[in-house]
Image: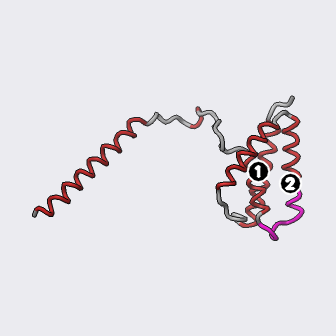
Amino acid sequence: MVRRFLPLSSMALAFLTFAAFMGAPAAAQRARLPASVLAPPTERFAPHPYTSALGAVANYQSCGFHVRAAAWRTLERGLHASEADATLKGLGATLERLRQDYYALRAVSSTTACGGGPRRALAYARRAVAAFRAWVAAQPGP
């Protein structure tokens, strides 16, 4: 009878300890705000059209022999033209910081080569380069 009592009391003690620790963070949580009132993220490694374009073009390039040469050249030219336009608008330092953040993240992450297959990778790369081009166009010029 004593053997049954000890596991039951230790289970009760474990449950009470768990309940006490789970209740503390819940009270300390901030109130949630709707997304419409939140400002865009300012911390490093936040999603950005430029890093999305870099990642999407690299993903399409990883498709190897499935890559269509003409599509690849179009993507590269579009990305480099948008980078040049951004640099002319005075965004060179921002692009450099974003590029370094992207490379730092890639250095410690693992990705699947040609994620989604060549067709999806190409479609996503086209959308990402177009979004980056639109972001550059929306920035005020010098």
Residue 32 x, y percent position in the rendering:
49, 36
Rendering quarter of residue 2: bottom left
- Circle 2 residue: 76
Residue 48 relative to residue 11: left or right: right
**Depth check: 130 or 23 in front?**
23
Residue 121 lies, with reference to residue 54, above or below; the image says below
Q: Are marks 1 and 2 in contact (CB under 8 Å)?
A: no
* Quadrant for the N terminus in the image: bottom left
- Between the C-alphas of marks 1 and 2, the distance is 10 Å
Which residue was labeled with disc 1? Answer: 53
Residue displayed at 82% across by 31% down = 140
**Does the segment drawn in magenta span residue 69?**
yes
Q: Amino acid at mark 2?
A: Glu
Residue closest to the eye, 49 or 35: 49
Judge from the rendering whether residue 28 lies leftward or rightward of residue 105; answer left or right. left
What are the residue bounds of the magenta stretch?
63-75
Residue 106 screen position, x and y as percent:
69, 54
- Amino acid type of the residue tagged 1 in the rendering: Ala
**Under tag 1, what secondary structure?**
helix
Which SS class for mark 2? helix
Asked whether, in this view, residue 15 is left or right of residue 133, the answer is left
Which mark is first along the chain, 2 or 1? Answer: 1
* Label 1 packing within 10 angstroms: few (<14), some (14-19), many (20+): many
